[in-house]
Structures are given as structure tokens and as C-alpha cells.
Amino acid sequence: MLGKGYVHRHQEALEHVRNVEGILRDKGYEVMINETAKERDATLFCITAYEEGYDLVVSIGGDGTLHETINGLSGQGHLPKLGIVPLGTVNDFARALQIPQGPEQAIRTLTSSRVKTVDIGRLNDRLFVNVVAAGSLAESVSSVSSEDKSRLGAFAYIKEGIKELTGHSAHPLFIRHNGKVWEGDSQVDGEEGPPLPIDLGIIPRHIRVIVPEEE
């Protein structure tokens, strides 16, 4: 037995879960499956996974599910490897790591022996990968409906973003990395806004993600 694998799934991923479970069992893992039903479920599942010494966590869902997953992998002790089966509209992080966008191909990637160690960002007490947004643009992204995402795909985010692109001032921010502090303005319209309680940082080599074998 190689270890224990912890799978949490998005509610739309039912047809893929058994394939993931079969692959992991073939590799010698014990498998625990959990389904997200409300906000922060994935985070709580992952906290349990690292507290109980699981060796692998597999996120099946979109960028929102993955974001919650990574925020559950914030402990400083034993951290499981991360497998990703992307089912969302954009899947930015999976694309950056060249994880296949097709669910079946992504599931087969879980058999890979190649692991990539990835830096993550910290915004106040929350973790993020790839990109972080604050203010009206972030609000516009979160307001995209499931219907628009199904109908328009990634263009749904562009549509909402254009609505918020002008007419709002940006704000000063601070970024901390390697003991140094960078202070700047995130202005896009030339107007100063009030300071925001934003503290950005980078945690180097924090998560280990299973990625495709090199060709």
C-alpha cells in the first residue's frame, strides 16, 4: 500500500469520480471520496487530509474548487501531493502546468511519476495561485452566472469585466517577498483611492502538483 489518497469532487463531476478512484486503487492507495456541497467544504476536506497524513489530494472541479483546495493545504507539517482534474470554464492553473483540459486525459495524468513544486501567493490570510484580484473587477468575475459560463465559456468573464473596466479608482498595495517590501499603486485611471488592507506575499515551493510525464 503506497498511502492514502483523498478525493474531493465538484457536484458536477460524478461520472469521473469512479475513474479516479480506480486509478488510485490500482496504484495502491486507500481512497476517501468527499463531495463539496457548500462554500469552504473543499478547504475543510483538505485540512482533514493533511492532519490525518494523507499522501495525495485530488481536486475535481473548476478554479473555485481548486482555490478552496489549496487553502486547505496551508499547514506547515505534512502536505499531500495535489492532483487536478479540471472541469471549470477557464482552468488557468491547470493550463499553466500543461495538465490536459479533457477530464479523461487529466485523470490518466494521475498515474504520472512527475511532480512539480509550485510557489503560491498569500493575500492576507488566504492563499492563491496564478492570479488574484480585488475590488470591482473581482466582484464582476464572481457575479458571472453558471448559465453565462455554460453558454459563453471564458467570454462570460470578459463580458462582465468590460462593465467594470472604467470609472473606478485603484488603490495602494504592499507586496512582501524574501524580507523585502514593495509599495506601489494599482491605479489605472490616474486617481488615487484610499489604502486597502492588502498584504501580499509569496510562499516558495509550497505545493507539489502531479503533472504529465515529459515527452
Image (spheres, grey):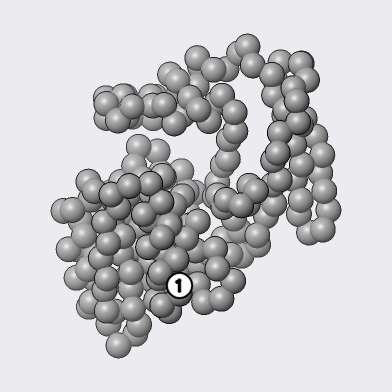
Q: Mark 1 points at which residue?
A: 50
Image coordinates of residue 39 in percent, x first then y, are: 38, 46
Q: Report whether residue 68 is seen.
A: yes
The residue positioned 74% from the left and 22% from the top of the image is 193
Q: Report whether residue 209 is seen.
A: no
Image coordinates of residue 62 in percent, x first then y, are: 36, 45
When asked about the image quadrant of residue 111, the answer is bottom left
Image coordinates of residue 36 in percent, x first then y, are: 30, 52
Image coordinates of residue 24 in percent, x first then y, are: 27, 73
Horizontally, residue 73 falls left or right of residue 59, namely: right
Query: Quick one: which residue is furthest to the bottom in this view?
Result: 1
When asked about the image quadrant of residue 1, the answer is bottom left
Mark 1 neighbour density, 10 Å: few (under 14) some (14–19) many (20 or more): many
Horizontally, residue 97 falls left or right of residue 5, namely: right
The residue positioned 78% from the left and 20% from the top of the image is 192
The quadrant the C terminus occupies is: bottom left
Give the total number of marks visible in the rendering: 1
Q: What element carries label 1?
A: helix
Residue 128 vs residue 115, the one in the foreground: 128
Q: What's the residue type where badge 1 is placed?
A: Tyr
Q: In the rendered view, tell whether residue 48 sits above or below residue 135.
A: below
